Image (cartoon, rainbow, N blue to C red):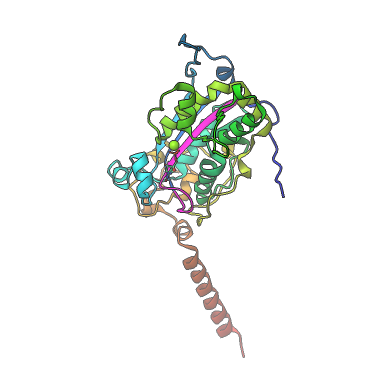
Amino acid sequence: MCATYEPPPRPIETFVFMDLEATGLPPSRPKIAEMCLFSVNRHALENPQYSNSFPKPTPLFPHLVDKLCIYINPDKPFTPTASSITGLNNEVFANNKKQSFNLHVFHMITAFFSRQHPPICLVAHNGYGYDFPLLKAELSALGISALDEIYCADTIKAMKALDRENNQLHQFLYQPSPIGSKKKYGLRDLYFKFFKVYPLNSHSAEGDVITLISIFQQRARDLMCWMDLNARQFNTIKNMYKENVRYASFSKTPMNIQPVPPSLLQDQPRRRITTVHPAILYPVDNGIDPTDNEYTPLYHRISELPDEIKNTLLLFIGLIVIVWIALKTPV
Ligand code: DCM
Ligand code: MG
């Protein structure tokens, strides 16, 4: 059965180019280690300035790009390949005291989106196959099932679709020769096709986003039109994998998120499994530092316990109540 997705209600206004680096590929249940978002308004993509390079002027990198790049402690070993291509390893995250994928990351993403003009479309190269399902899995582990009103589009899918429609002059990858040879839509090959050199900083999230935008600019109007018609809601993306929810669920609408007091946004001592105190979700300005365990209400501590322990506790309490009632009842 073919799923149908609702495209944006009107032309996309903001394209947020995204790339993730992580501990590996599926099915190793990768965890995000680096995330980079570059937000570019449609106006900048439709009206680029050009370099006077020969033989053909090239669009200059857009101005007024908002950027959000963060390193995230994956709390999971990198596969040897992932470590070798990204240059990242677990030691460097520990040495630099990087925090895990926690609610601060979610707040940063939603605050970043809140500053962009809608409709907003997340754009990633192989986004449907990797970046979107991975981001979705990490958000789900925080109890966040969706990012409302955000669309997404995969540049590989868009480029393949345009290549099927266009004559060879406008193709992203045109290979006249060997029969059956597979066209390569990797970022490096595409970049080489347009610029005749290989891109810098491959397999760094920021480097890959810059490379993607440079390629996108080569056929910006076609790609934007395709995305206006074919982008789908981020909520329709399936998780790459399922993980037990680590934190309490809360409203998924960015506007409903309570502001987080600056004191709570400071680095917190790393714990083995990162947890975010419920007071971060529902901050109350009562003068008490909610991260201080001395003041943590008992029900908050209990709510942080694993489900199995909570269920056993409930069963135990239930048994005590039944025995108490049985003893009190006259025979
Ligand atoms: N990756 C991998 N092995 C590869 C290619 C990628 O483990 N051969 C993983 C690690 C990268 C992530 O995918 O951080 C994203 O890939 P890319 O750097 O191409 O965006
Ligand atoms: Mg990358």
Q: Which residues are magenta?
A: 14-30
In the picture as drawn, the residue positioned furthest to the front comes out as 178
Residue at screen point 49% across, 35% down: 186
User: Is residue 46 toward the left or the right of residue 21 in the image?
Assistant: right
Residue 242 x %, y %: 53, 55
> So how many labels did they put on this image?
0
Residue at screen point 45% across, 53% down: 28
50 over 101 or under it: above or below: above
Image quarter where ligand 2 lies: top left
User: Is residue 138 toward the left or the right of residue 91 in the image?
Assistant: right
Residue 252 x %, y %: 58, 43
Front in this rendered view, residue 242 or 96: 242
In the picture as drawn, the residue positioned furthest to the top comes out as 52
280 over 149 or under it: above or below: below
Q: Is residue 12 magenta?
A: no
Residue 24 x %, y %: 42, 48
User: Is residue 247 toward the left or the right of residue 88 in the image?
Assistant: right
Front in this rendered view, residue 64 or 321: 64
Residue at screen point 48% across, 32% down: 187
Q: Quadrant where the C terminus lies?
A: bottom right
In the picture as drawn, the residue positioned furthest to the bottom comes out as 331
User: Would residue 37 be visible to someone looking at this image?
Assistant: no
User: Would residue 255 be visible to someone looking at this image?
Assistant: yes
Front in this rendered view, residue 14 or 155: 155
Q: Is residue 28 magenta?
A: yes
Residue 160 x %, y %: 60, 34
